[in-house]
């Protein structure tokens, strides 16, 4: 990972959102084809909805920028399982931030499904997709959470908002599954 991203992660961790935004904007404008940059910048914008003051959100045009980043991601990275996971997750959590609530919630769930189709052995993708379905049984969900726990810690071990968020939200190994 580039040193630029490591520097930004330090800014994120110390809640220096404006400085992080400025650096993200700068490096993303120079290379929109770098998925790692897109991923962390997009997630930064998504998390800014909850984590930053409305004055900052208004200043940067957060919701329009988030929607723009989402669409650019779909154009550039639609065949990447990780893109479908991240974008599908974020859209399915806050579909109203992107436009038509019902259509986007369904699109998010379809993206989560696509991630599992592209990488059927990825336990994290499977866990999140199953969690998005109303028909998923508690027993199956608990088993999947247990199986994915070590992968979550491995996959999201780094610094920055994205890794911290997914470790907190997806690491669900408080109990062994019922057998």
Image: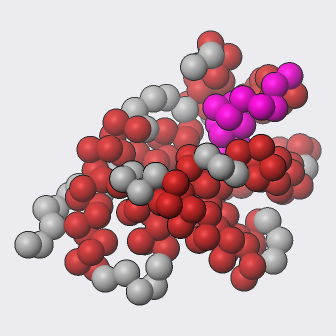
Give the left or right position of residue 121, taking residue 65 as reference: left
Classify 137 as above or below 153. below
Which colour assignment does the render follow?
A: secondary structure
Tell me residue 41's x, y (percent).
Answer: 71, 37
Give 42 or 49, whichever is nearer the viewer.
Answer: 42
Q: At x 73% / y 73%, what residue is drawn?
A: 104
Give the left or right position of residue 7, taking residue 75 as reference: left
Tell me residue 43's x, y (percent).
Answer: 65, 45
Q: At x 36% / y 53%, what residue is drawn?
A: 121
For the N terminus, which image quadrant?
A: top right
Mark count: 0
Give 58 or 122, whichever is nearer the viewer.
Answer: 122
Tell me residue 9's x, y (percent).
Answer: 59, 26
Magenta segment: does it hold 50? no
Q: At x 72% / y 29%, what residue is drawn?
A: 34
Q: Residue pushed farthest top?
A: 3
Tell me residue 139's x, y (percent).
Answer: 23, 77
Q: Which residues are magenta?
A: 30-46
For the C terminus, which image quadrant?
A: bottom left
Give the left or right position of residue 89, taking residue 144 as reference: right
Give the image quarter of residue 59: top right
Q: Is residue 54 visible?
A: no
Magenta segment: does it hold 37? yes
């Amino acid at each position: 990972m580039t040193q630029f991203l490591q520097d930004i992660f330090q800014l994120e961790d110390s809640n220096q959102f404006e400085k992080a935004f400025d650096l993200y904007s700068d490096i993303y404008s120079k290379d929109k084809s770098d998925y790692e940059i897109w991923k962390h910048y997009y997630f930064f914008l998504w998390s800014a909805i909850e984590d930053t003051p409305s004055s900052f959100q208004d200043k940067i045009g957060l919701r329009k920028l988030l929607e723009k980043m989402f669409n650019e991601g779909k154009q550039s990275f639609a065949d990447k399982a990780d893109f479908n996971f991240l974008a599908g997750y974020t859209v399915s959590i806050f579909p109203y931030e992107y436009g038509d609530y019902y259509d986007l919630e369904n699109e998010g769930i379809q993206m989560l499904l696509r991630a599992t189709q592209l990488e059927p052995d990825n336990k994290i993708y499977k866990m999140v997709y199953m969690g998005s379905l109303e028909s998923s049984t508690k027993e199956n969900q608990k088993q999947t959470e247990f199986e994915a726990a070590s992968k979550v810690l491995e996959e999201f071990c780094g610094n920055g908002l994205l890794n911290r968020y997914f470790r907190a939200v997806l690491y669900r190994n408080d109990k062994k599954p019922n057998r």
